Amino acid sequence: MQKRSFKTILTLLLALTLVLPAVSAGPASAADNAPAKVAKYGTYTSYFSDSYSELAGKSNVFETLTYHQLWNLFNSDGTYVVLFGGAWSDHTQSVIGYINDVAKEYGVKAIYNFDTRLDGDTASADIADSSSPDTYRKRYVELVNQHLTNLELEGAAKISYTVGAQSGEADRIESPYLFVYNRTNGDGAAPIVSDLQELLTEADFQTDGKIDPAKVEAYKAKVREVFDPISKETDGKKAAIHSLIDNESYFRSTYNAAAGRTVFTGSRVVFQTVTYDELKKLQESSGDYAILYGGPWCPNTQPVIDLINQWAIDEGIQTVYTWDTRLDNGFDPVTKEFKSAELHVRDVNHPNARIYVDLVNQYLTNITTANSKHANGNPAAPPETPSGSYLIWSGEGEGRVYAKRLQVPYVFTYNKDNVDSTGTSAPIYGHVELMYTWTNIEEGHTSGNRDRFKKALNLLSTRQESVPTDLTTVNASSSSAKNGQIKGVSEALEYKANGSDAYLPVEGTSITGLAAGTYQVRYRAKTGYNAGATEPTEHYYAAGQTVDVIVRANSGSPGSGDPGPSTPSPEPTTTPEQSGSNGKPVAVTLPASKDATSGITVAVVSEEEAAKLIEVAKQDAAAGKPTAVELNVKADSADGTTQVTLTREDYNKLIAGSNVELKVNVGLASIVFDSAALKAIGESKDTGDISFIVAKSSLTEDGKQVLGDRPVYDLSVFAGETSISEFGGSEVWVSIPYRLQAGEDAQAIIVYHVTGEGELHTVRGQYSAAAGAVEFGTTHFSQYIIGYNKVAFTDVPAGAWYGNAVTFLAARDVTNGSGNGEYNPGAAITRGQFIVLLLKAYGIEADAANAANFSDAGNTYYTGYLAAAKRLGITTGTGDNQFKPNDLITRQDLFTLLYRALEVLKEVPAKQSNASTADFSDAGQIAAYAQKAFETFVASGVVSGNDGQLSPKANTTRAQVAQVLYNLLAAN
């Protein structure tokens, strides 16, 4: 692949400690360290970078607050930094980046952002706008008058309200308004410690159309004046001292106050409240999320939210995002009770019902709710006077828009990109809508509701992703054997062999009895619980999209023909008499502990476990069979460093005289060494123990400016205190768990190796949706970065059949397009252009100038690549020592060059079917020199032809070339 040079890469990119020598490992027992569950639901942390152009791609200190969260902050002891403002405001957009810069300079950990526009958009939902309803303005006026008692804004407009006998008036805060708040400051008389309100636009920071550093610095100086009163100066550097919100305490106190009793009983709380605009951005982002609609005011949410919380903890769910249809959590700022419906946007007669209607119709397109079935009508054809209990609408007359009315609590799983097996968008793929009370949810109640709710939640978590990931395979012992496996499955899945019509349900955690071949695996059709249900009786959610899983034979090639489905057999429940590995991986789970001195998590293969592995390897060796060993570790945390150690004596015995493959899985990453690599490690002159180390870190702040916030991994092997970085030319396979971030394109995920010269070398690797990981091969160990390099072309439309291929190649600098931001997909490609693409795709460097070359190689972009292709035997030219690089390339020449390159690389694709060139009507037109290439690519599925023809003499377009290279690279 390609190199990207950054002069300051070594000083910018890497955090301070990555490579560490192996720590001394003491003896270990064979006790099993059972891993806790880890859910596949994601987290969303990019709201501010998604919403503010000046924060895009940068780390920031901002956190959103809902109305009641802000009210709670104002009633909490401590010193807080707060910003009133929203992404809708040009004034806020123009300064938020500068506020962030100064906050980071002062070490501010969090600035709490409150948007007076509770929908993040319109004046009608702005509690500080005179055009909004009185019930909205009541929230603002009471907030200011009860808490910001020393607010002084010169020339400020007044906001007033009258709701029944209640009324009030307060100065209007314009966005952005930055201030420091401490309710006890000045004995409570001056809670606003310091503040800044300047309404500036981008033009105010410019001179002659360019950003003026002096104007920026002048504004930053004013921001510093806000932080100075709460800062301490040490060695000329100021650091702000301030408080942070305790999210867990907030949830506990809020629900306890609303319910009048203790609600949460567990040791922690996993919920995170989001604002309406934040919810929209979350639901626009890529990934799988667990979401709860509900709030503390709701008598049906109160009794079950602790059950939801405990379910999430048990399932290993990091965050459940919660949004309240009452934008103020039902909190009345006058009565201080959670009984108000004044801001309940799910109510038919609410002036801002369109907030709810838009949310459902835009994002929850396949929502199911007990109210969906009401005979009065549906959103497509509502009755003249529909019941507000079943449909919500906004607008009047012909402009009226309807949405289904869900009931809270409504727990659901969501992925905006999810489609079902019919290709229909289905962003919701599971839900629970059960409404119980404190009385009928009690333990032992005759209704059984408590157990039913738990059962419903457990059903919900059987599917935690759009498509199956983290699947692994066990090779069939031969191309004719039916003992291959697909592991990491669950009974929520179903599968079938390629070409078969019927799906079979998965039983257990492995699919066994498989012949080598390709299998489709998907999530089965799924039920849910609507309100009032005692059992889920309908399949509300169709089966999901499939992922292809290839089961290979031990030769490394899939079997030929269609293996057909095989009936899965259960894993044995008793330990059979020892007779080698029986063709299955021999796995042990190692206990791990953290070294107090180094902080490294260390796992040691005990003498007992080692003896078992060695015995299996001996028996396999005697039978002439290979042995696959897996060492699995549950690391203490998602970051840090993990080490797996075998004594040198045990290591030498394990690899002696046998064909052993070793997989080391530490959670942060899994690494597979073949027998040649293991023997190369064993040849080290250092006779100390063998340690495999994986360290995860992050880029420095400067490094993040170059590449974004990307994870860094350091892979190392030690013999005693000697680092071993190469493995005798053997390729080691690495798999690093990875979840796509919001908006990331899987094809643009790449792997960088940081060279000693300070260059980023793109290695061959990619994101695998089936494995939920980034996978790559390497012949040496060093530091690797999971990068992201999305290159967009104006003439490659979304959904184009070649779109993924172009994105994949461009991300790896294989192609830079044709210029002016275009790829020119329909243009025919020349022979010289193809050689460059081919060699760059497979990481073959161009030869130096003056290397032996073709007479017409010239001195241009393809010259060095032609020399390399000639030297390697990929091409002999067209005769008379010419290559004719500017001629358009025919399909048969293209496939011949491609085949020869794969021969050199020992990557010729294996036969996947019985298809042959004889199946095509124009097979007789294939030149003799191209016959073998076509036969290979047809049988392997790389070439499928068009309308029963292979068109060997036709020219090839840039789109077609990209797709062919992508088919090979992405499958390997």
Image: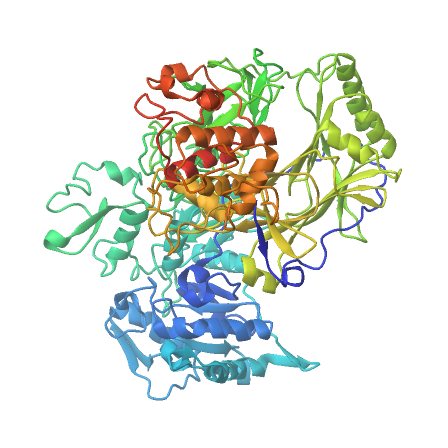
From where the camera sits, is residue 897 visible? yes
Q: Is residue 404 left or right of residue 293?
A: left
Taking depth in this image into account, of 934 and 403 the one nearest to the observer is: 934
Residue 279, horizontal then vertical, whole percent: 39, 54
Residue 517, horizontal then vertical, whole percent: 51, 19
Q: Is residue 771 left or right of residue 537?
A: right
Where 684 sits versus 129, above or below?
A: above
Residue at horizontal 85 percent and vertical 40 percent from the top: 26
Taking depth in this image into account, of 531 and 896 the one nearest to the observer is: 896
Residue at horizontal 43 percent and vertical 82 percent from the top: 149
Q: How many marks?
A: 0
Q: Is residue 346 left or right of residue 184?
A: left
Q: How is the image coloured?
A: rainbow
Residue 763, quarter of picture: top right
Where 226 sits versus 747, above or below?
A: below
Where 550 sits versus 379, above or below?
A: above
Residue 205, quarter of picture: bottom left
